[in-house]
Amino acid sequence: MPPPEPDPVQARRTTTRLLWACAALTVLVGVFQLAGILNGDGEYDALAWIGVAIAAVSLLALIGIYCACALERLSLRTRVFRLDLFQVTTVLLLVAIVAGVLVPSSNTTALALLLPWGLTYWLHNLNQPAE
């Protein structure tokens, strides 16, 4: 019996669901970081507040990119200057993790961003164009 033919509509729906899941997971990371910040007992210095601001901007950018890709407004392969959008998310991920480490209460929470990034890594490399 031959293997079943791939269904492009189902594949597109699955990709969209995974991108929405990436956005939702990133929102959850932001919520956990915010909860840690609000539970902080004034242990934040200027460097920590800079980390909070940079991490927040990076998280918002990642959420925006994942939502735009899920809505099919953008693709992970969309070129932005010399980088594709997936490479931009990688830079934002690294910035968010480094900035999250500067925040005393959310060192490990920032590492949770690796899960949605891993999903987008898989999606980005799933159907590479023929060279």
Image (cartoon, rainbow, N blue to C red):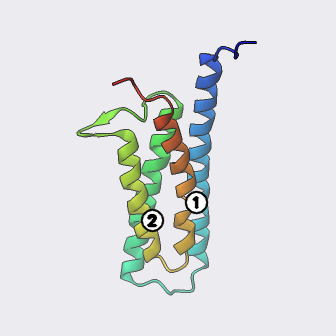
Q: Position of residue 105 (x, y in %)?
A: 55, 78
Q: Secondary structure at mark 1?
A: helix
Q: Earlier in the sequence, mark 1 or mark 2?
A: 1
How busy is the neighbourhood of tag 2: few (under 14 within 10 Å), some, or many (20 plus)? many
From the image, state whether disc 1 or disc 2 is nearer to you. Answer: 2
As measured in the structure, the alpha-carbon distance from the residue carrying label 1 to the one carrying label 2 is 11 Å
**Residue at position x 38%, y 23% in the image:** 130
Towards the viewer: 58 or 107: 107
Residue type at mark 1: give it: Val
Look at 33% across and 25% down and name the residue there: 131
Relative placement, left or right, of 35 versus 74 is right
Q: Position of residue 65 (x, y in %)?
A: 45, 41
Which residue is painted at 37% across and 40% down in the image? Answer: 85
- Report the residue marked by disc 1: 29
Lateral position of residue 34 relative to residue 80, left or right: right
Specify the quadrant that holds the N terminus: top right
| Residue lying at the far front of the rendered structure | 1
Mark seen at residue 112: none
Return the residue nearer the eye: 104 or 128. Answer: 128
Q: Is residue 11 above or below residue 58?
A: above
Q: Identify the amino acid type marked 2.
A: Ile
Q: Secondary structure at mark 2?
A: helix
Q: Whole-percent x and y of residue 129?
A: 40, 25
Q: Marks 1 and 2: CB-CB under 8 Å?
A: no
**Residue at 44 percent of width and 28 percent of height:** 73
Q: Which residue is mark 2?
A: 97
